[in-house]
Image: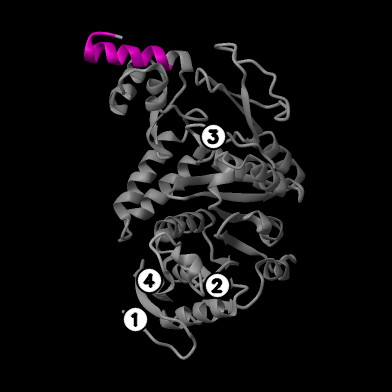
Amino acid sequence: MEETSPETDFPTEIVKEGNVRLLVPKLKAFVKSPSEYAPSKAPVFYNPVMELNRDIAVLALQAYQRTVDREIVVCEPLAGCGAMGVRFAAEVKGVEKVVMTDISAKASKLASQNVRINRLDELVTVEHKEANALLSDYSAPHRRFDVIDLDPFGSPVPYLDSSIRALRNSGFLALTATDMAPLCGVHPKACIRKYGGKPLRTEYCHELAVRLLAGCLAATAAKHDIGINVVFSHSSDHYVRVYATMEYGAKKADESLRNMGYILHCFKCFHRETAKLHSFAKNEGKCSECGSKIEVAGPLWLGKIFDKQFCELMEKEAKHRAFRHGEKIRKILALIRNEVDAPVTYYVPDKICDKLALPVPSVKKVLEVLKEEGFQASLTHFNSKGVRADASAMNMKELLRKVLMSSYGKF
């Protein structure tokens, strides 16, 4: 329903999300054509599509709070209308305080209204400051946050340094990146500039995006003698998300950097492998399977991008939440739990079959045959048609022909 308020000079409406009511810009009022991106046209940023992201963030924050088993102080430095920060305060048990800020005066006012609407004045503080300025204010010892959630429109990189400095030891950092064109290899130079690693336009580019973002975080944290431990990540819609705990100490930083490396990919035969030492500026390498030119992605994070215990804690929390996207979230979490220990990267049988001019078998059948042949195999949340397996590209081609032979009696 539409609301009017003396504090807003633009059309707004009340929406229900999670356990809270939010006063948000009425997005339909700010678009002139269906092709326009409504959230960026409104005076204050609010994207209803990101409700799923906020739902998962609530689960992740609650899982972290259960892990540390104490009250936590949370910062939302890019607040917009305050949706994320208000939900953290209202829905996560054990939150002592939430500090929100936005560079926009209109956004800060709207966020303050949402705090009042949900009667969270004692838990939530809203400031009107640029994100890095606020984070710097909290960078001194004994002022730092337990949790910082960076959820920008675009890249979180401009706020990484100040966020790392404003996190206490064993703190929890959540990062969103929506600039998928650079991260997925459409604009590789932009990715190298922002994230310090080269992307590739492969069928598993969304996993590369997560690993490039995590690698950028590890490299930035290491400059401050801080190590990272990625406990959860996911790719949904138009963005990727990484959750990591931060551990103080030069040794921890060194341990993190040992997880950095490269992924070598052959576009001709689909072979891929990881390498710890390789110059991405020189691509003279040859594919070990077919002898063609090998392409390189990285440096990026080759370590774990999910932690099994953390995923299980999130699944446990999800059972007790009545989210609008609850069923979808439980499916994502179940898929991630099964791919926790799977190899880096995944295959998309459609792509291989297309290259070989073969019919495409069902993913379920491919998974069955892989397991029958003794390979570790699982589905992946990154791509509904993807399969993670410790099989080589050559093995995959042979197995696909075997599946098709059993189904059609040829190939």
The numbered mark at residue 201 is: 3
Q: Residue furthest front?
A: 33
Say whether marks 3 and 4 touch (CB < 8 Å).
no
Q: Quadrant of the N terminus?
A: bottom left
State the CA–CA distance, disc 1 to disc 4.
11 Å
Q: Point out the tag, 1 or 2, that comes first from the N-terminus.
A: 1
The residue at which mark 4 appears reads as: 28
Image height check: is 136 above or below 314?
below
Q: Secondary structure at mark 4?
A: helix
Q: Point out the tag, 3 or 1, that comes first from the N-terminus.
A: 1
State the CA–CA distance, disc 3 to disc 4.
34 Å
Q: Which residues are magenta?
A: 396-410
State the CA–CA distance, disc 1 to disc 2.
30 Å
Q: Would you identify the image quadrant in which residue 324 lies? A: bottom left
Q: Residue at x 46, y 83 (%)?
A: 116
Say whether marks 1 and 2 touch (CB < 8 Å).
no
Percent x, y of residue 211: 58, 39
The residue type indicated by label 4 comes to Lys
* Mark 3 surroundings: few (<14), some (14-19) or many (≥20) residues within 10 A: some
The residue at which mark 2 appears reads as: 97
Q: Point out the tag, 1 or 4, that comes first from the N-terminus.
A: 1
The residue at which mark 1 appears reads as: 2
Dominant secondary structure, magenta: helix
Say whether marks 2 and 3 touch (CB < 8 Å).
no
- The answer to whether residue 400 is magenta is yes
Image height check: is 292 above or below 347?
above
Q: Secondary structure at mark 2?
A: strand
Q: Residue at x 41, y 28 (%)?
A: 348
